[in-house]
Image (cartoon, grey):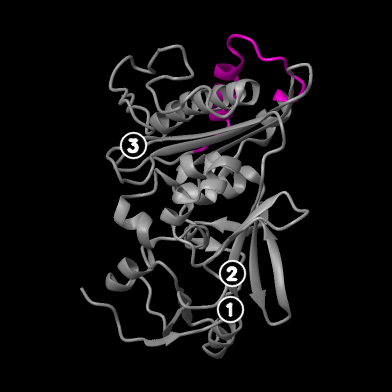
């Protein structure tokens, strides 16, 4: 199927993009990588009056570390592959590299953008979960100038965000981890390149006594938005981790989830996988906080759970973990 007819505008600045969106009164769409938008156009799931192409807009293709701010700013035209190749970003925020390596296939990562993924707001996607985990912000340009939307206010429901249709997202801002912080991300998908059936990300910061000063845990693929496990995060604060801490936390977080079943997996299956993934990423994040970023690779089978599989089989040796039945 081919897309319905639309006007096409290639803009040279974020301001021009915003003016163009406003002129169409919310009936236009922004085109960056197009890895989600173009298939939706072809299937006529969306029929915008116009596309506003921001790929040549000045200044949107940059990764920046603003002075005196512990954040990285990723422009709206930066590709997933650009982030994966960015050496400084890989050193300072390795969870981003870990998560984006799971996005689709190389061709998708070469064209797709982290900001586009955030704005598409697929609840199974990696980048929205990372933004929620880190407490990042979306930087947007509106009629009154630039403003920011925190992650916990940005995602409203499936494929729906708080960004007004006349405004344009120009970047995402992600906090950089403080000392003694470890982070990890992992997911389970049926096949390489598929969306995650369930994904989980964790961040653990330790105090000088080795206790948990702050823990963060997020899931994707189990709700209509990325799901933070706020109650479990609060319960972990001040804890000195011991054998079983992460498994108990993962189980407690999964018990509070309300995933839906579909043709790919039942709700019970998703909840079980969520518990195991949460334990895995929390344990890996803790080890990285204690030993450094190279500790506790999440990629190996059962890296954080002592070798036991939920069903004792089908654990694939890659970032996607296994497919417990």
- Percent across and percent down for residue 209 are 78, 16
Residue in front for this viewpoint, 181 or 221: 181
115 part of magenta stretch: no
Q: CA–CA distance between discs 3 and 1?
A: 41 Å
The residue depicted at 38 percent of the width and 29 percent of the height is 269
- Percent across and percent down for residue 325 are 31, 24
Of the numbered discs in the image, which one, if any, rests on residue 265? 3
Instruction: Look at the picture and state if 118 lies above or below 260.
Output: below
Q: Is the C-beta separation of discs 2 and 1 under 8 Å?
A: yes
Q: Label 3's element?
A: loop
* 314 relative position to 116: left or right: left
N-terminal of the pair, mark 2 or mark 1, is 1
* Residue bounds of the magenta highlight: 236-258
The N terminus appears in which quarter of the rendering?
Answer: bottom left
- Percent across and percent down for residue 18 are 58, 82
Q: Label 2's element?
A: strand
- Percent across and percent down for residue 8 are 39, 86
The residue labelled by disc 1 is 14
The residue labelled by disc 2 is 170
């Amino acid at each position: 199927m081919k897309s319905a007819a639309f006007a096409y505008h290639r803009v040279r600045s974020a301001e021009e993009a915003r003016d163009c969106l406003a002129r169409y009164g919310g009936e236009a769409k922004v085109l960056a990588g197009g890895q989600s938008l173009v298939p939706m156009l072809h299937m006529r799931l969306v029929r915008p009056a116009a596309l506003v192409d921001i790929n040549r807009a000045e200044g949107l293709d940059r990764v920046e570390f603003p002075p005196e701010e512990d954040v990285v700013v990723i422009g709206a035209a930066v590709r997933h592959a650009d982030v994966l190749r960015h050496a400084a970003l890989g050193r300072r925020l390795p969870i981003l590299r870990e998560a984006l390596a799971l996005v689709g296939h190389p061709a998708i990562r070469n064209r797709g953008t982290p900001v586009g993924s955030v704005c598409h707001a697929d609840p199974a996607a990696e980048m929205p979960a990372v933004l929620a985990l880190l407490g990042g912000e979306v930087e947007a340009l509106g009629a009154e100038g630039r403003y920011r939307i925190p992650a916990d206010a940005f995602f409203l429901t499936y494929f729906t965000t708080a960004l007004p249709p006349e405004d344009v997202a120009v970047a995402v801002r992600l906090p950089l981890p403080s000392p003694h912080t470890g982070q990890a991300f992992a997911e389970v998908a049926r096949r390489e390149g598929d969306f995650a059936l369930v994904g989980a990300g964790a961040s653990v910061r330790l105090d000088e006594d080795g206790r948990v000063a702050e823990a963060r845990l997020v899931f994707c693929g189990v709700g209509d938005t990325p799901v933070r496990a706020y109650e479990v995060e609060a319960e972990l604060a001040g804890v000195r981790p011991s054998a079983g801490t992460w498994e108990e936390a993962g189980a407690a977080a999964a018990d509070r989830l309300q995933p839906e079943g579909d043709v790919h997996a039942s709700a019970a299956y998703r909840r079980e996988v969520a518990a195991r993934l949460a334990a895995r990423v929390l344990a890996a994040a803790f080890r990285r906080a204690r030993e450094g970023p190279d500790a506790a690779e999440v990629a190996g089978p059962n890296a954080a759970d002592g070798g036991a599989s939920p069903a004792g089989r089908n654990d694939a040796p890659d970032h996607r973990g296994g497919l417990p039945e």
